[in-house]
Amino acid sequence: MTTDELPRGYAIEVYPVARPAGQFGWAIRKHGKLYERSDFTFPTEQKAYAKALEAVERDARGEVQRDRR
């Protein structure tokens, strides 16, 4: 799945984090609202984007079990 093939309504944001410097995090937006965010940092933008894409694919397949209390 590439950027052009993201399921409708999903957007991936990759951003630099303050600490540690030079690392990146990601966030997934679903219909404009924050849906999921990385807990870990990644050494490159490409690795962060790849992990975010994996999370989108899992969610699109219905494999994500979200805790709804």
Image: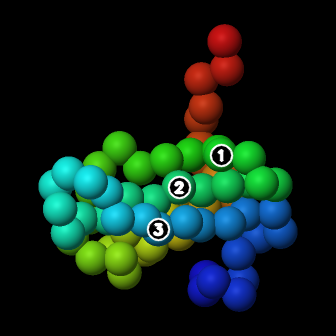
Is disc 1 in contact with disc 2, using a CB cutoff of under 8 Å? yes
Residue under the image location 35 percent in, 44 percent down: 39
Residue underneath mark 1: 34
Q: Nearer the viewer, residue 2 or 16?
A: 16
Circle 2: residue type = Ala
Q: Amino acid at mark 3?
A: Val
Question: Which quarter of the picture shows residue 64?
Answer: top right
Left or right: where 34 falls relative to 38: right
Which image quarter holds the C terminus?
top right
Q: Describe the colour scheme in one phrase.
A: rainbow
Q: Is residue 57 visible?
A: no
Pick whichever of labels 1 and 3 is earlier in the sequence. 3
Tell me the quarter of the image containing the N terminus. bottom right
Q: Is residue 27 left or right of residue 51?
A: right
Label 2 sits on residue: 27
Horizontal side of residue 6 vs 51, given as left or right: right
Image: 65 above or below 49: above
Callout 1, which amino acid?
A: Leu
Sequence-wise, the earlier of marks 1 and 2 is: 2
SS under mark 1: strand
Locate residue 29: give its quadrant: bottom right
3D distance between C-alphas at marks 1 and 3: 13 Å
Instruction: Give x and y (percent) for residue 6.
Output: 71, 75
The residue labelled by disc 3 is: 14
